[in-house]
Image: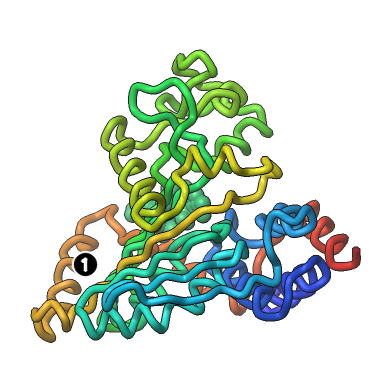
Amino acid sequence: MTLDEVHAIIMKVLLKNGCDEANATAIADNMTSAERDHAVSHGLFRLPTSVTSLQNGKINGRAEPTLSRPSAGAVRVDGDRGFTPLAFKLGKPALVEAARTNGIAALAITRTFHFAALWPETSALAEEGLVALAVTSSPPYVAAAGGKRAFFGTNPMSFAFPRKDGPPMAFDQASSAMARGEVMIHARDGHMVPDGVGIDSEGQPTNDPNEILKGAQLTFGGYKGSAIALMIDLLAGPLIGEAFSAETGRADNGDGGPALGGELILAIDPVGMGTGSQVLDHAEELFAEMTGQEGVRLPGDRRLKARNETPTEGIQVPLSLHQKILELAEA
Ligand code: NDP
């Protein structure tokens, strides 16, 4: 498919299944950018479960997010139980303005469903010249260090830094050792997973993905990843008046779509740090020294390479997924 075809079919499916134009456009833009960058786990792959959640009424396809400013450096957007992209679209200009005015600012997005990758949000802010950090919680799939049951979400974080020429550096990673989708794909294909990915329902280490899906995943880096997952649960939960992962799971209808929750995004203006114009030059020195070593690349470079290729080459969509999406478009 071409990227234009991807965008068009997402719009058609969403408009037929309960979204209004504003919500559908924000979601289609997000999913298409994921396909453009070969971040396939957050592109068309998410469309069928998103439709399920629209159809059963869990997610509001006609959400009208609202914005408030509790303090000079804080922006809040209430997502009205819709998908996150439209809430971010509303909050971003206010966050950029607050960061430029104060040097640093935060955007709290509440009452939304985050189905997506986080780099589109941090990259969009870095393209405005800001340093950005985003975190969100997800339904509980991951044990806290030492624990035997799923407690944290796969709790991702993304960090983006502007570049002098070209798109920002942005990494984006879950705090679980393996992405949930990867564990499911191993189970589907009958493959074992490496050590350290998860535990069974008795809390025993296992390499069997089916047992992990019944038990719990583990964080990356042992107790250090668990601390990061805890931080994300706090930042995207209690700090902004939202549920933490375990709570989002308890409130969810278990339809396979995302759970209602929050996201926190921080933006720092390098100018506001008083560092002056050498910030980007100095960062470029770091990037150059780092990637000058054999075998070292910047996080995000795989995506940016794909971004250069897909506008002309298009993308490959698995036949079964394509068929499903066509059915949803005609339903
Ligand atoms: P990966 O482990 O695939 O990648 C994590 C990061 O590491 C990426 O930025 C990647 O860059 C970078 N990277 C990978 N290999 C290298 C390397 N050799 N050298 C330097 N950098 C490297 O991601 P995850 O599986 O942890 O997460 C996948 C996605 O899932 C994320 O986008 C995350 O936001 C999303 N997610 C969303 C959730 C939600 O609730 N909305 C929940 C959990 C995850 P590159 O892409 O260029 O390879």
Q: Quadrant of the C terminus?
A: bottom right
Residue 250 position (above or below residue 146) = below
Residue at 47% in and 42% down: 245
Quarter where residue 83 is shown: bottom right
Callout 1 secondary element: helix
Residue at 45% in and 30% down: 197
Q: Position of residue 63 (x, y in %)?
A: 64, 71
Q: Position of residue 21 (x, y in %)?
A: 71, 80
Q: Is residue 240 left or right of residue 26?
A: left
Residue at 62% in and 70% down: 27
Residue at 32% in and 38% down: 225
What scheme was used to colour the molecule? rainbow
The residue that disc 1 covers is 287
Q: Position of residue 219 (x, y in %)?
A: 38, 35
Q: Position of residue 50 (x, y in %)?
A: 69, 57
Residue 1 position (above or below residue 222) = below
Q: Pick the residue in front: 278 or 200.
A: 200
Q: Is residue 174 left or right of residue 231?
A: right
Q: Quadrant of the N terminus?
A: bottom right
